[in-house]
Image (cartoon, rainbow, N blue to C red):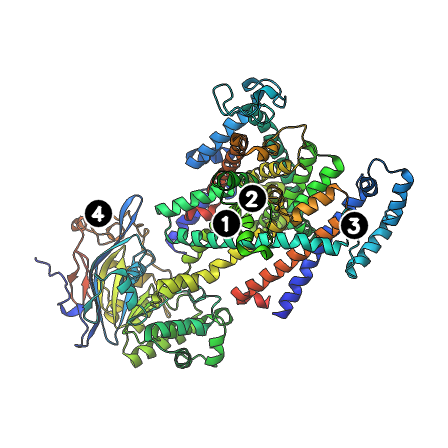
């Protein structure tokens, strides 16, 4: 039986409608060079995001999702070696020199960080941080930039915007800070916004508000959004499509609702089962046995095999990302619907 | 902000009074008689007694202290026993030299320290960084007075670019002044600049790892601005502390340098005054240093408050 | 708790080993694995040996004047040359080492002992702390030179005087370090737990606080030693240190400045020995800090 490898031309890899593709990532691999040699962190990641679409990059800590995001942004660490192609708005950006890459940040790509406490400068005013970006990327005058900054803060739901502009980050609550981050990220009108676990550090009640805000922004500005998270429930609710990662690999890729309802990859299935859910009748939770292999200690063949209940003879060879019923799966023995 | 400064000021008061009390007690309670020293071997006991009464040295110690305290508050610091002039006139002559020396040395130290530290941090672990770190370690281990001697040997004796010793005040012309202040300033500043280089490097390395620097880069800001405005603002704070300590050290501890280069500075004046048991001058000198240091500390506190607004509300 | 967190905690406590215990054996082992540490220790050993064996290496009174041998440049017979009074520089350096190192050691031991006691008390008892720290601030504002000069004036310049002056001046930095560490340790939950169980205060000090403080103290000791050697040299240089009857690297340089042009080697060799010692002590302190301070191990 020949395996049809999933490439970008297959239906599930592309969004349902024929909207403009904002971001295309093809065979992205990132390795870190240190004293001991070259350490692969991420291998052969491919996906795409269209205008107005939210794609989740999901997985546990250590699966490589954050470094994938920083590679896309162009802010990976100096000792990172990146191969593969990244195409933004139709133009290949992966081959660009460092300085050109950096110029794209802010203007074409926005980034929302996880920890608003530490991701904003502690001793510069909020206004200064916002006007710096606006002035540099859009060439606005100080007055125009200040006006725009006030507008943006207002738009993200921060009251008394003008006063806040003169204040400092430590005067704001966690939720407010994250709104400032969002305002900052979209301030120059980027086409892509990458949100790295934007709600993880927030209280539960605030999480919902921030997610709503992100959704609003996405619709209003037709933003392509890459949403990095470890929370699968969030993925199901918020995102159109999902890319599930494990130990540097993409293990499943497709429509978010499908993956959450009936995942094809045993790891994704394990994640769903391990989550406590409202109205759960189970007496105990079912965790995935074993631990995530640390970088540099990946097993040969399928990286999930040592922990997989379905592992078989073929699993000594790393499976390709293949088209399955409703999603692309990297597995020799994928689950069928309803399993 | 005002309340913050007031609070800092109150905390500074012990740093002025404790040294004064120490020096008062040390001098009055130690053997050796200023009157006898002034009049020399030929003086008769009656003459010495007369001088002692005249100088108020025969009063009980708390009376002496009260008189002295009153003197401070009325800015009458008495007369120098040795110079036979009011202390208030003797000290400024020497203070100006020390302050000028400190300023020049501090400018050198800060300029070199910040620059080298910054370059080092930005090229971490590359050859230039290792070079700077090695030089900084050597600089910290360099005894200032020995370095001064070496400088004299190379630049004054061998190359004859500078005079060996002596002091020209700025009124004698910028070049003449510079010629006499440069070598001492270098000798005094080298060690401090090494300390500042290390602090700048370490502080900058810490800051460069902070998330807000990544945010600044992710906003597309040019590296020049990321380092110059965003990183430096936070990284500079510990360096300000070191600079303050350096200034404090230079004001009071440059005695060896002043002696080697024959600069009429405050440190040297103090040491000689102590040997002569010139109480009023020693007390006046210590008071001057304490006051200058107190003002210096307040200035540093203001700089902190400017650099880090969070501090203003403490 | 994620799996990575679990393994990390396991590694920290490693089944039974106290998180704070740093056995002397492992410190030695780690020290010898560090290149800079080896070099600095080697230098210090050589200089110490030279000092101890001074009467053997360079017999005779180093201060004895020999007018016939004035200003001999470095040569086979006088490897460091002779000075303006005909004294052999090698003898002076080697014998001077004894005083310089002795003063350094004494000052380090005395000032740090006092600092540990005061710092621990200060860190532990709030009321004492408030008063003590103001006094220390006041002390630090006092120019050390003046204190040393006054002491020299009162007691006459000598090794004993200089040890006392330097010890007083150098208490403050160590005191702050100890106090800072005690403040941190005091807040730890295990102290609360121990007190709740009723462990007597003295026991708290010996079993919990002192071990936590030992690492920064070790690091600090190296730097204090270095500062003491430097301080003594400076004071002796200007004449308020050990006095003319004794010999250290500092006062070997006092007269030297008058003869720089004629005999630069008089200035060179004692200063070089001084700098080398200070350098080695500083490097040792740096290595110790790299080894013992867990926060710093992630970034070099």
**Is there one chain holding both mark 4 and mark 1?**
no
- Helix, strand, or loop for circle 4? loop
Position of residue B100 measured from the top left corner of the image (x, y, whole percent): 59, 54
Q: Which residue is mark 3?
A: B84
Judge whether C213 appears above or below B16 on screen: above
Residue A245 horizontal side relative to residue C94, left or right: left
Quadrant housing the N terminus of chain B:
bottom right
Whole-percent x, y for residue A210 in the image:
39, 74
Give the crowd class for mark 3: few <14, some 14-19, many >=20 residues within 10 Å: few
Which label is found at residue A300? Answer: 4
Q: Earlier in the sequence, mark 3 or mark 1?
A: 3
**Vertical side of C159 occupied by A131: above or below:** below
Q: Are marks 2 and 3 on the same chain?
A: no
Please give the label number shown on residue B193.
1
Circle 2 — which element?
helix
Rate crowding at label 1 as few (under 14), some (14 to 19) or many (20 or more) other CA atoms within 10 Å.
many
On residue B15, the disc is: none
The secondary element bearing badge 3 is classed as loop
Residue drawn where x is 30% and y is 57% of the image:
A63
């Amino acid at each position: 039986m020949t395996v049809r490898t999933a490439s970008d031309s297959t239906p599930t890899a592309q969004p349902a409608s024929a909207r403009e593709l904002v971001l295309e990532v093809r065979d992205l691999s990132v390795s870190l060079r240190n004293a001991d040699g070259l350490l692969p962190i991420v291998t052969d990641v491919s996906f795409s995001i269209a205008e107005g679409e939210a794609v989740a990059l999901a997985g546990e800590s250590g699966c490589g999702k954050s470094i994938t995001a920083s590679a896309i942004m162009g802010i990976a660490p100096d000792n990172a070696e990146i191969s593969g192609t990244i195409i933004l708005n139709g133009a290949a950006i992966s081959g660009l020199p460092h300085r050109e890459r950096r110029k794209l940040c802010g203007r074409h790509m926005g980034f929302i960080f996880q920890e608003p406490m530490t991701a904003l400068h502690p001793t510069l005013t909020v206004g200064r941080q916002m006007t710096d970006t606006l002035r540099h990327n859009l060439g606005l005058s100080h007055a125009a930039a200040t006006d725009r900054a006030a507008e943006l803060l207002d738009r993200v739901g921060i009251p008394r915007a003008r006063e806040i502009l003169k204040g400092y980050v430590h005067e704001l609550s966690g939720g407010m800070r994250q709104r400032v981050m969002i305002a900052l990220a979209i301030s120059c009108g980027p086409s892509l916004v990458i949100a790295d676990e934007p709600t993880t550090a927030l209280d539960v009640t605030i999480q919902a508000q921030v997610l709503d805000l992100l959704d609003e922004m996405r619709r209003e500005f037709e933003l392509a959004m890459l949403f990095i998270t470890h929370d699968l429930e969030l993925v199901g609710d918020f995102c159109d499509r999902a890319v599930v990662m494990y130990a540097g690999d993409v293990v499943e890729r497709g429509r978010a609702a499908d993956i959450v309802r009936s995942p094809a990859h045993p790891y994704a299935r394990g994640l769903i089962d391990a989550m406590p859910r409202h109205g759960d009748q189970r007496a105990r939770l079912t965790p995935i046995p074993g631990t995530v292999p640390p970088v540099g200690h990946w097993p040969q063949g399928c990286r999930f095999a040592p922990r997989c209940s379905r592992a078989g003879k073929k699993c000594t060879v790393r499976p390709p990302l293949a088209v399955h019923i409703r999603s692309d799966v990297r597995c020799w023995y994928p689950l069928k619907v309803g399993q | 902000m005002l309340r913050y400064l007031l609070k800092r000021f109150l905390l500074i008061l012990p740093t002025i009074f404790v040294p004064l009390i120490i020096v008062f007690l040390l001098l009055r309670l130690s053997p050796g008689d200023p009157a006898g020293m002034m009049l020399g071997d030929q003086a008769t006991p009656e003459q010495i007694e007369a001088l002692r009464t005249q100088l108020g040295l025969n009063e009980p110690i708390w009376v002496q202290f009260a008189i002295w305290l009153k003197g401070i508050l009325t800015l009458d610091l008495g007369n120098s026993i040795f110079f036979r002039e009011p202390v208030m006139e003797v000290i400024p002559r020497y203070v100006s030299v020390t302050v000028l020396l400190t300023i020049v040395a501090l400018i050198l130290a800060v300029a070199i320290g910040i620059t080298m530290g910054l370059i080092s941090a930005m090229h971490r672990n590359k050859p230039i960084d290792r070079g700077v770190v090695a030089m900084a370690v050597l600089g910290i281990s360099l005894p200032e007075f020995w370095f001064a001697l070496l400088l004299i040997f190379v630049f004054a004796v061998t190359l004859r670019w500078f005079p060996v010793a002596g002091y020209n005040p700025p009124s004698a012309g910028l070049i003449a002044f510079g010629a006499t202040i440069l070598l001492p300033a270098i000798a005094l500043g080298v060690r401090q600049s090494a300390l500042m280089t290390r602090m700048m490097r370490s502080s900058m390395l810490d800051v460069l790892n902070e998330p807000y620097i990544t945010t600044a880069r992710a906003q597309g800001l040019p590296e020049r601005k990321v380092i110059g405005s965003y990183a430096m603002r936070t990284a500079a704070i510990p360096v300000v502390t070191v600079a303050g300590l350096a200034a404090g050290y230079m004001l009071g501890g440059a005695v060896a340098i002043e002696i080697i280069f024959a600069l009429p500075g405050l440190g040297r004046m103090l040491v000689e005054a102590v040997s002569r048991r010139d109480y009023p001058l020693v007390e006046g000198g210590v008071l001057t240093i304490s006051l200058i240091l107190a003002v210096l500390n307040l200035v540093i506190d203001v700089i902190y408050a400017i650099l880090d607004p969070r501090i203003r509300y403490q | 708790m994620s799996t990575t967190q679990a393994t990390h905690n396991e590694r920290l406590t490693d089944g039974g080993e106290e998180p704070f215990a740093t056995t002397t054996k492992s410190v030695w082992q780690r020290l010898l694995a560090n290149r800079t540490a080896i070099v600095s220790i080697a230098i210090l050993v050589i200089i110490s040996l030279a000092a101890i064996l001074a009467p053997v290496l360079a017999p005779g009174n180093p201060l004895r004047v020999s007018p016939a041998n004035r200003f001999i440049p470095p040569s086979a017979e006088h490897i460091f040359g002779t000075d303006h009074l005909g004294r052999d520089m090698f003898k002076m350096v080697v014998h001077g080492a004894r005083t310089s190192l002795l003063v350094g050691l004494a000052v380090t031991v005395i000032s740090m002992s006092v600092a540990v006691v005061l710092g621990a008390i200060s860190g532990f008892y709030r009321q004492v702390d408030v008063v003590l720290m103001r006094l220390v601030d006041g002390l630090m504002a006092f120019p050390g030179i003046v204190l040393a000069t006054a002491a020299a004036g009162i007691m006459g310049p000598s090794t004993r005087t200089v040890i006392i002056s330097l010890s007083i001046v150098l208490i403050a930095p160590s005191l702050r370090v100890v106090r800072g560490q005690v403040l941190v340790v005091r807040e730890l939950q295990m102290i609360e737990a121990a007190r709740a169980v009723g462990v007597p205060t003295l026991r708290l000090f010996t079993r919990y606080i002192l071990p936590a403080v030992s690492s920064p103290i070790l690091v600090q000791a190296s730097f204090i030693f270095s500062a003491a050697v430097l301080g003594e040299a400076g004071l002796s240089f200007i004449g308020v240190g050990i006095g003319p009857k004794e010999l250290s690297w500092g006062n070997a340089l006092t007269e030297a400045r008058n003869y720089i042009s004629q005999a630069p080697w008089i200035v060179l060799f004692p200063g070089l020995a001084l700098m080398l010692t200070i350098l080695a002590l500083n490097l040792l302190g740096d290595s110790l800090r790299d080894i013992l301070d867990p926060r710093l191990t992630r970034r070099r």
